[in-house]
Amino acid sequence: MRLGVLDIGSNTVHLLVVDAHRGARPIPAYSHKEELRLSEHLEEGNLLSAEGVERLGAFVAEALRIAEDKGVEDFLAFATSAVRDAANGEQVLAGIDERCGVHILTLSGQEEARLTFLAVRRWFGWSSGRLLAFDIGGGSLELAGGVDEEPDVAVSLPLGAGRLTRDWFTADPPSSDEVRKLRRHVRAEIARTVGRIARYGRPDRAVATSKTFKQLARITGAPPTSEGLYASRTLTRETVAEWAGKLTTMSAAERAALPGVSEGRAAQLAAGAIVADATMDLFEVDRLEVCPWALREGVILRRLDILPGREAELTSS
């Protein structure tokens, strides 16, 4: 089956077309994305601006045309923190539904954490034991841990790299005082969740997803994207702590010149690194493995799990 998944994130709106069949890994067939940075289109009162709404509607209409051209049989669309946090988010999605004829589901932060955890579990398999998964998005930080496909605990915190950059930094690079205040805020927020997750036991494997962790891994020597999904990519607490300090002293232009850092993401990488450093430190994780699958793949896998006909397959001779 050819499946289209539209991911409306805080930074990027991404249409991914995959060839997906139950029991097999989803194979990407086509990708189309644009950095709309919806989180930057929130006006006073936490409303998505008219410009943001118009750009989002235009992209959704384009995505539907592309999906039809690519032979998509099933289409899923979901939105995360930028739309979730907007006071008019549901109104905006209803308007797009009326205009384009597509229902867009708004995921809660906890659902994001659960579905990302599912993708991580499927990627690493049962032999990886108890997993601890971290995902830093544009608007939120997701944390989840467990031994099954459904995590024992899933938490979402408003500590996304884009959100923190917008709310806490006023200069480029930020002042040392702004960095110190953000660092204190981030660590206090994360520290409140450590006990909820740690009480289930230490993880056998700690895993990271998201652009922030992937960029930090690339900066610290991980293989580039061109080497494929199966190349091993890791991060150590020591190197993340070192770069969390360095990145806050660099301008966005200087960060964009680093390997693996896109111009569009460079401005928020310093705040993202502060979150990554705090998360590894407070959860006492010395080494993270970077997983190429994340929320989109979790959504795809869950969709495949509920396809009709499974009972017939199980009972057929």
Image (cartoon, rainbow, N blue to C red):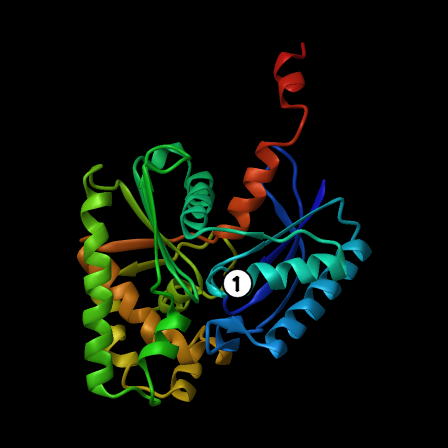
Q: Secondary structure at mark 1?
A: helix
Q: Which residue is nearer to you in this view: 287 or 302? A: 302
Instruction: Locate residue 116 relative to residue 217 in the image: left or right.
Output: right
Q: Position of residue 12 (x, y in %)?
A: 55, 68
What is the quadrant of the N terminus in the image? top right
Kindly give the residue lying farthest to the top in the view shown: 317
Which residue is located at x 64 percent, y 31 percent? 307
> Callout 1: few (<14), some (14-19), or many (20+) C-alpha neighbours within 10 Å?
many
**Residue under numbered circle 1:** 83
Specify whether residue 140 is in view.
yes
Q: Position of residue 144 (x, y in %)?
A: 34, 46
The amino acid beneath tag 1 is Val
Q: Position of residue 147 (x, y in %)?
A: 33, 34
What is the quadrant of the C terminus in the image? top right
Which residue is located at x 20 percent, y 54 percent? 192
Q: Position of residue 115 (x, y in %)?
A: 47, 45
The answer to whether 204 is drawn above or below residue 50 in the figure is: above
Instruction: Locate residue 254 relative to residue 60 in the image: left or right.
Output: left
Specify whether residue 285 is in view.
no
The answer to whether 9 is drawn above or below residue 200 in the figure is: below
Quarter of the figure with residue 64: bottom right
Q: Which residue is nearer to you in this view: 53 or 8? A: 53
Which residue is located at x 23 percent, y 63 percent? 278
Kindly give the residue lying farthest to the front in the view shown: 45
* Total labels drawn: 1
